[in-house]
Image (cartoon, helix red, strand yellow):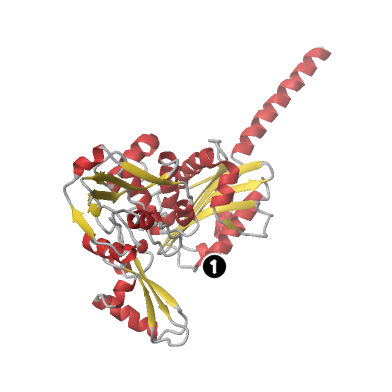
Amino acid sequence: MIKKIGTFRIFLLLIFLMNHTETFSQRFSNKKISRIISKERSLDGSSVAFSLGQLSNSKRIVDYNSDKLMTPGSNVKLLTLYMGLKNFDSFPILNYRKKNSKFYFWSTGYPLLRHHKKSDTTIIELLKSQKDSLIYAVKKNQSKLLGPGWAWDDVNYYFSPERSTFPIFGNLIKIKKTKNDKNKLDFVPKYFEDNLLAEQIDIVDDFKVSNNKDSILIPFRTNDSLFVKLLEDEIDKKIDIEYNELELSENFKTIYSNDKALYELLIQDSDNLVAESIIMMTSGIGSNEFNIEQQINTFQKNEFTDWNDKIFWIDGSGMSRYNLLNTEFILSVLNKIHEILDRQGVVNLFPRYFLNYDKIGSVFAKTGTLRNNRCLSGYIYKGQKIYVFSLMVGNHNSNVIELNKSFKDILLKITKKL
């Protein structure tokens, strides 16, 4: 009889432990999350979605509107990062071939040639060293210079440079006031000192009388002949252009770089041209043309098969208003990224948020901002435990400072019980 009672108690204990484990996997009810969100004034009237779980665990600790499609802004760059990590051990900088005393070169889509923040001079040094005639062979581009769903009133701002097959200077003009004479300006590249468009002249005139800016960046309108002109100025050599040299791609050499500056610009600086260029580069692998949209569709079908009819992924940067993702999908991407980078890779690459606020844990995340939309998605390291999270807010009317405070408050209330 005593043995039967003991066995029965063990059975009850096992049932309790099973129920407790299940409760832990979904610790916060949607009702409780709703109450937490409702206390944040900055989120009044907005749409909120929130997912949080342990790394590589399908059970969620928070699962609030996780299937709701939201505008992700630069959270799309997480998808672009994953595409880059899957396709590149090292980055192709330039393709070239020598033929009949001519040095033919063509683009890989690499965007750091004379980039204003992280300039790569490898191409310039190679071209300067050539004794043969230089021929730029143009590789066909099927993608438009401005992405689908981009705002036309953004085209004169630094964050909206045109996409091109061979970016130079980040497709931006840097204009800086001189120390002794604010009316005198320095231009990089210097070509634009005398070759600005009418709308660019207006921007420069406003900049001259501004007291709170020492320098500005303005996108320029790209084309093949302008690219060649700017590159000629850099190497002080003549470059000819040819458009029909596809047979060159049969026997050619490629220069590579192991510099991770591309990913740093993508995640830490949220550089939109770099984001688009990573997908441009991927689309050009083994192809005689570039096609960003086709590459996104192919990658999504291959890597995110279960999400093909549930999300809308349009560009590499997140500037498109047509992008729609949900928090559950973002968590799946974060898991895949962590499998490749591991903990130290994430810490090295992702910005740290809520610094000196360890009550939450160590938060490494990527923001996403598009008018009236704000997102924060990434990783929380709390002791030996690793969590992935995505918090998306749509249709808000608050400023970024207020939203960041609300994000911190929400994460604190959740993580202090983990």
The quadrant in which the C terminus is found is top right
Q: Is residue 143 above or below residue 82?
A: below
In this view, the residue in front, 382 or 343, is 343
**Left/right of residue 39 with respect to residue 358 in the rendered view:** left
Q: Residue at x 42, y 59 (%)?
A: 271
Crowdedness of circle 1 by 10 Å Cα count: few (<14), some, many (20+)?
few
Q: Is residue 84 above or below residue 155?
A: above
Q: Position of residue 235 (x, y in %)?
A: 33, 62
| Residue 204 point in image, percent of width and height | 34, 80
Q: Amino acid at mark 1?
A: Ile
Query: From where the camera sits, is residue 316 visible?
Result: no
- Classify 287 as above or below 398: above
Residue at point 20% right, 56% down?
241
- Which one is nearer the viewer's eye here, 213 or 54? 213
| Residue at image coords 18%, 52% | 242
Q: Mark 1 = which residue?
A: 401
Task: Provide residue 175's location: percent of width, then percent of height.
Answer: 38, 75
